[in-house]
Image: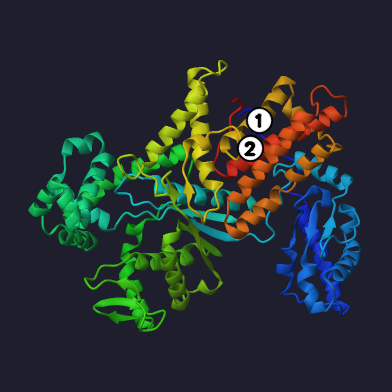
């Protein structure tokens, strides 16, 4: 490792962010209002009120602002501005307030209470962050055990563009939660036992090619899967448009029914089907693992559907015994919304189990073995109703510990092409994930063509980091609940909110320190005082110290785009600082102070990108 990749090992974490400290002061002020009879503020009201203490929209108004006076004014039967004056007066007297913050000014507008961090407090905090291995980010006060269930592809077919969102969103949340101090357990709940294997087993016996399987197992199995899927799902208009498909359908008229029979035989333990499943699985898993390594995505566990198969009958029996599930048209379901609404099916009429059954068995197993406080399911928004019913059923089931577990569906939108439809190849096929990554890397490689300081091997390494980082960042910078249009050109731009822009900012920091011949470790050991005297220095230092606040906000709503927006803002503030102020050529002590601020900015940008699963490079 180089000095750029290590960090000082000073005291961890600090005593909370400035926002934490200010919210504590506001809590003191609001409790004082209630105690003096000015306004009825109960303990249950405080969390929502303190959420209204945020950074100001414009620096000219201060660094933080509290806006709760407007909402509380009606309760207090007072004008919002008058109530804001009362809150501000008590705020200034709160324990610890004056050490960190200047006295609040007169409320602005209809009751905004604006607060500025004291310059000496800012200098002390940014200097402490410089020697802190956690970069000034405190650990969460109440660590939880959190299971993050993400990616979860069907292993019998190649991963495609549709898997990118679950994979990168889930990975970034897991990284971020672990850095915050939680005990995080990641699980890739693979689809390794469903109808897709019935399709492959049925298709292998009729269309399989041993030589093709030996040469490229995943490609051959994928070919079989796609062919059988077309046969099983073919509508009359599909057959009319494709004579070859029509001929196959005429030759195999019972394909759809026979696929289900092969699936049922596999689940019942048929030796031949089991042997084929065991033969095909290693190749499928190896192909998926190769992609995960390339994406730098790792899992603690890989407990697929097949792992839970032995427990499914017991789940249904227990639900029936407890009176939660009953027979309906030959199937077994849980009636969550009365008899007039479709039930949440846990067993089909032919005896086969469903995703619902497996998901319930998985919840029970996780409760028994991991004792989680939260379980996050990072899954497409189209599965929203399934998770709504799953969570309701799990709660009614009454499993030990279920009442205290938060079950959360972290939903996301669809990746679209320029035409506004799900992203496809020109031939109309779903874009394979490997080809998606290859294209991004090749485009990044082409952009490095003019860099004479890099040999071909180094260009390849840079292109891999930049290309894959661009694809990840383009996804993560979106509000996860919305669809977004995929564009290689936009994601690789060195301007705007892109990974390349962020990576370039890191490279600029490296350039300053290398040009100055700075011994980073000596700089860290010296623990210099950082004094952000210029407004641009102050702006940059304050942004760095908001790192912990941003991570708290990301966790609260599982939205990595809040982190990307902050990183983009931080890079912009660094650029304003870098362009306007001399660093290497200024006199001491400003020179060392600014060098330390540069170094800390680079480490924070690198850490923030790392929490998104995105690498950095020393030169671009």
Disc assigned to residue 4 = 1
Say few, some or many: other residues with alpha carbon within 10 Å of mark 2 (under 14 / 14 to 19 / 20 or more). many
User: Closer to the camera: disc 1 or disc 2?
Assistant: 2
Residue ranking furthest to the front? 419
Which sits earlier in the primary sequence, circle 1 or circle 2? Answer: 1
Picture quarter containing residue 539?
top right
Task: Give the residue drawn at x 65%, y 52%.
Answer: 551
Give the Cα distance between marks 1 and 2.
Answer: 9 Å
Name which residue lies at 66% across and 55% down: 552
- Is residue 562 shown above or below 30? above
Number of numbered tags placed on the structure image: 2
Left or right, residue 256 beside residue 112: left
The local secondary structure at tag 1 comes to: helix
Q: Is residue 211 above or below residue 326?
A: above
Q: Position of residue 61 (x, y in %)?
A: 83, 52
In the image, taking residue 244 as reference, residue 149 lies left or right, namely right
Does the residue at mark 1 contact the one at mark 2 (Cβ under 8 Å)? yes
- Residue with the most extreme left position: 251
Give 246 or 432, whichever is nearer the viewer. 246
Question: In terms of secondary structure, where does tag 2 sit?
Answer: helix
Residue assigned mark 2: 606
Residue 563 visible: yes
Q: Count residues near mark 1 (Cα–Cα under 10 Å), then give few for <14, some for 14-19, many for 20+.
A: some
Which quadrant: the C terminus?
top right
In the rendering, at what x and y percent does residue 32 appear? 86, 73
Residue 131 seen:
no
């Amino acid at each position: 490792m180089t000095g750029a990749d290590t960090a000082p090992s000073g005291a961890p974490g600090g005593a909370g962010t400035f926002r934490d400290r200010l919210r504590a002061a506001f809590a003191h002020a609001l409790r004082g209002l209630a105690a003096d009879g000015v306004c009825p503020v109960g303990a249950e009201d405080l969390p929502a009120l303190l959420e209204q203490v945020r950074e100001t929209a414009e620096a000219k108004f201060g660094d933080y602002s509290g806006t709760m006076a407007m909402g509380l004014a009606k309760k207090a039967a007072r004008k919002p501005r008058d109530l804001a004056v009362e809150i501000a007066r008590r705020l200034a007297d709160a324990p610890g307030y004056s050490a960190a913050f200047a006295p609040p000014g007169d409320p602005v507008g209809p009751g905004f209470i604006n607060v500025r961090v004291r310059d000496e407090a800012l200098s002390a905090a940014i200097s402490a962050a410089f020697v802190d291995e956690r970069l000034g980010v405190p650990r969460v006060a109440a660590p939880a055990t959190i299971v993050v269930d993400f990616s979860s592809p069907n292993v019998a077919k190649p991963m495609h563009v549709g898997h990118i969102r679950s994979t990168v969103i889930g990975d970034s949340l897991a990284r971020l939660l672990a850095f915050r101090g939680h005990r995080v357990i990641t699980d890739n709940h693979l689809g390794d036992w469903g109808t897709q294997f019935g399709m492959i087993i049925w298709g292998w016996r009729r269309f399989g090619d041993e030589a093709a399987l030996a040469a490229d197992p995943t490609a051959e199995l994928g070919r079989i899967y796609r062919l059988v899927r077309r046969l099983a799902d073919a509508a009359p208009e599909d057959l009319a448009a494709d004579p070859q498909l029509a001929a196959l359908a005429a030759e195999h008229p019972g394909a759809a029914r026979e696929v289900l029979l092969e699936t049922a035989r596999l689940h019942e333990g048929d030796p031949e089907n089991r042997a084929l499943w065991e033969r095909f699985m290693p190749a499928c898993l190896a192909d998926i693992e190769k992609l995960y390594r390339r994406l730098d995505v790792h899992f603690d566990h890989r407990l697929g559907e097949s792992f839970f198969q032995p427990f499914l009958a017991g789940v249904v029996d227990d639900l029936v015994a407890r009176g939660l599930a009953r027979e309906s048209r030959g199937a077994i379901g849980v009636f969550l919304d009365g008899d007039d609404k479709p039930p949440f099916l846990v067993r089909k009429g032919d005896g086969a189990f469903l995703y619902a059954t497996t998901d319930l068995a998985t919840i029970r197993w996780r409760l028994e073995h991991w004792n989680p406080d939260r379980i996050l399911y990072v899954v497409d928004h189209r599965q929203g109703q399934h998770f709504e019913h799953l969570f309701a059923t799990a709660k009614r089931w009454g499993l030990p510990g279920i009442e205290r577990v938060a079950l959360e569906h972290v939903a996301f939108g669809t990746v679209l092409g320029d035409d506004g439809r799900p992203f496809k190849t020109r031939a109309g096929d779903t874009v394979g994930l490997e080809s998606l990554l290859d294209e991004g890397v090749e485009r990044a490689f082409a952009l490095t063509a003019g860099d004479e300081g890099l040999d071909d091997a180094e260009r390849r390494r840079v292109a891999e980091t930049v290309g894959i980082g661009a694809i990840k960042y383009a996804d993560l910078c979106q509000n996860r609940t919305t669809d977004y249009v995929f564009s290689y050109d936009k994601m690789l731009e060195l301007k705007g909110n892109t990974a390349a822009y962020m990576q370039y900012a890191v490279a600029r920091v490296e350039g300053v320190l290398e040009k100055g011949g700075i011994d980073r470790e000596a700089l860290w050991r010296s623990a210099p005082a950082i004094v952000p005297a210029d407004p641009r220095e102050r702006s940059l230092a304050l942004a760095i110290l908001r790192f912990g606040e941003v991570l708290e906000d990301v966790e609260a709503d599982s939205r990595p785009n809040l982190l990307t927006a902050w990183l983009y803002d931080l890079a912009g503030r660094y650029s304003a600082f870098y362009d306007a102020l001399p660093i290497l050529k200024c006199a001491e002590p400003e020179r060392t102070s600014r060098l330390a601020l540069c170094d800390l900015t680079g480490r924070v940008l690198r850490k923030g990108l790392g929490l998104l699963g995105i690498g950095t490079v020393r030169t671009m």
